[in-house]
Image (cartoon, rainbow, N blue to C red):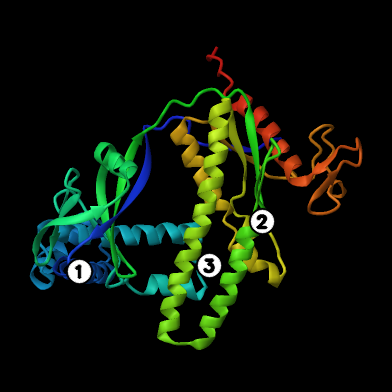
C-alpha cells in the first residue's frame, strides 16, 4: 500500500521573505542598536511578568505591562504592543515545541529548564516592526523607522531589482530588523499570488541522499562530493578554533557556521531551481520521498552521526516544494519504504537487490542500474499511482 502526503494544491498565496541590506549612517546605526536593546529588554520584562503571573494571552499581558514598557524602557505605544506580542509568541512557540517533543521527555534536563525559567531575549535579537513603525520609500530606496531617539528618516537600503519589484508589489505585514556581524538588514514578508497547479503529464522522481544530494528518475545526478569536501574542511577548521578556547575564536566559529549554512543553502537552491525548471518545461510534477523523522529512525555509527546531522536533505525538500508552488508545478511526497530495494520492473523487493551503495541488480528479473536512479524511478511510479488515487472524483452519495 502506498502511503503518501500531498502538498497543498490550492493556496491563496506563496509566502517569501526578501532580505535587504540597510546602509545607515553612524548616527542612524547607533539609534538602531539602542532601539534593538530597548525593545528586547522590554520583551524580556514582559516575558518575566507573563511567566510569574501565568499571563499567556496578549490582552491580559498587555494590560499588566503596557504602562511599564512605556515608562521604564522608553517605548512608544506601538513598539510596546509589539514587545508584548513578541513575548506571547515566544511562549506559544515553546508550548508547540513541548507538545511536539522537540525538547525531550518530561524528565530531561532541557525540558525541565525550558518550563522552569522565563524566556529571555538576546539584547540584539531581531525585532519586528509593522507599518505604523516602519515605512518604505521604494523610489528613493530609503526607509523611515521608529527608534528610541525619534523617527529616523532616509535610511538607505540596497537590494536587487527583482527584490525591489517583489517589495513594491507583494510586501505585506511585519518586517524584522536584524543586526548581523555589524551589518543591518530588514527582512520583509511578501505574499506572492499562487499560480494554478496544472494536471501533470508525468512525474520526475527525486531520490535524496548523502553521497548524491539528488538523483532524478531521468538519470540526472547532483553529486554531494564537493559539499562533503567543503564540510570536512570546515570541520577541521572548527576543531582548530574550538581548541583555542578564546572569545575571538568563538566569534569566528559563529561566522564560519553561518557561512557554511549559506553555502549549503546556495547548493540546494541551485539543485532545486534546475529540477523545477525541467518539470515546468516538460509539464511534469515533482515527487520526493517523505523523510520526516529519519534521524530518529536510523541507527548510525558514531563516525556517521555528524554526516547525517549536517545532511541538508530537509532544506532541499523545502526548496523544491516552494519553488514548485511558485511555478505552478505539482509537488508530491510518497512513502520512502524500500524505494532503494524494490525492482521497478517486476516489483521484487529484497535487500540483496542492492549489493552495495551504488549498484542495483534485481535477483528475480536481472534489472540492473545505478541504485539512486532506480530509487528515483520507484518514487516516480509511486507518485503516479498515488496521484491517480487522491485525484479520483468522489461519487455523490446515494
Residue 240 sits above or below residue 355 on the image: below
* Residue to which mark 1 is pinned: 42
Mark 3 lies on a secondary structure that is loop
Proximity of marks 2 and 3: CB atoms separated by less than 8 Å: no
Percent x, y of residue 6: 55, 35
Whether residue 251 sits left or right of residue 369 in the image: it is left
Compared to 278, does 396 lie above or below? above
Left or right position of 341 against 317: right
> Quarter of the image containing the C terminus?
top right
SS for dot 2: loop
In this figure, which residue is indicated by the disc labeled 3? 105
Q: Closer to the N terminus: mark 1 or mark 3?
A: 1
Q: Counting other residues with Cα less than 10 Å from the Cα at mark 3, is it few (<14), some (14-19), or many (20 or more)?
A: few
Report the disc number at residue 210. 2
Looking at the image, tell me whether mark 2 or mark 3 is earlier in sequence order.
3
Mark 1 vs mark 3: in front: 1
Q: Which residue appears at 73% of the width and 41% of the height?
A: 373
Amino acid at each position: 500500500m502506498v502511503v503518501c502526503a500531498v502538498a497543498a494544491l490550492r493556496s491563496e498565496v506563496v509566502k517569501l521573505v526578501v532580505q535587504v541590506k540597510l546602509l545607515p549612517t553612524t548616527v542612524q546605526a547607533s539609534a538602531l542598536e539602542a532601539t534593538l536593546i530597548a525593545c528586547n529588554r522590554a520583551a524580556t520584562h514582559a516575558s518575566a511578568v507573563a511567566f510569574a503571573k501565568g499571563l499567556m494571552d496578549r490582552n491580559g499581558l498587555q494590560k499588566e505591562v503596557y504602562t511599564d514598557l512605556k515608562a521604564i524602557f522608553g517605548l512608544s505605544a506601538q513598539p510596546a504592543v509589539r514587545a508584548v506580542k513578541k513575548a506571547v509568541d515566544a511562549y506559544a512557540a515553546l508550548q508547540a515545541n513541548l507538545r511536539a517533543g522537540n525538547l525531550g521527555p518530561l524528565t530531561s534536563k532541557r525540558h525541565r529548564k525550558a518550563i522552569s525559567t522565563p524566556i529571555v531575549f538576546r539584547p540584539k535579537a531581531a525585532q519586528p516592526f509593522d507599518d505604523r513603525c516602519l515605512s518604505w520609500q521604494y523610489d528613493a530606496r530609503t526607509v523611515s523607522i521608529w527608534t528610541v531617539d525619534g523617527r529616523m528618516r532616509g535610511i538607505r537600503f540596497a537590494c536587487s531589482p527583482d527584490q525591489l519589484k517583489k517589495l513594491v508589489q507583494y510586501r505585506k505585514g511585519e518586517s524584522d530588523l536584524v543586526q548581523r556581524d555589524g551589518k543591518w538588514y530588514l527582512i520583509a514578508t511578501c505574499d506572492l499570488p499562487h499560480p494554478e497547479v496544472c494536471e501533470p503529464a508525468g512525474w520526475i522522481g527525486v531520490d535524496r541522499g548523502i553521497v548524491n544530494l539528488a538523483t532524478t528518475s531521468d538519470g540526472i545526478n547532483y553529486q554531494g562530493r564537493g559539499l562533503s569536501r567543503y564540510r570536512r574542511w570546515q570541520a577541521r577548521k572548527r576543531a582548530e578554533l574550538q581548541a583555542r578556547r578564546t572569545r575571538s575564536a568563538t566569534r569566528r566559529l559563529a561566522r564560519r557556521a553561518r557561512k557554511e549554512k549559506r553555502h549549503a543553502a546556495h547548493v540546494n537552491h541551485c539543485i532545486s531551481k534546475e529540477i523545477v525548471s525541467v518539470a515546468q518545461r516538460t509539464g511534469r510534477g515533482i515527487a520526493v520521498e517523505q523523510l520526516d523523522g529519519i534521524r530518529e529512525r536510523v541507527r548510525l555509527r558514531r563516525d556517521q552521526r555528524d554526516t547525517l546531522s549536517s545532511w541538508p536533505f530537509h532544506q532541499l525538500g523545502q526548496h523544491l516544494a516552494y519553488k514548485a508552488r511558485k511555478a505552478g508545478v505539482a509537488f508530491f511526497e510518497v512513502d520512502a519504504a524500500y524505494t532503494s530495494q524494490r525492482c521497478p520492473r517486476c516489483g521484487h523487493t529484497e535487500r540483496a537487490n542492492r549489493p552495495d551503495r551504488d549498484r542495483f541488480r534485481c535477483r528475480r528479473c536481472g534489472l540492473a542500474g545505478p541504485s539512486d536512479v532506480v530509487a528515483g524511478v520507484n518514487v516516480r511510479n509511486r507518485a503516479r499511482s498515488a496521484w491517480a488515487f487522491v485525484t479520483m472524483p468522489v461519487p455523490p452519495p446515494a
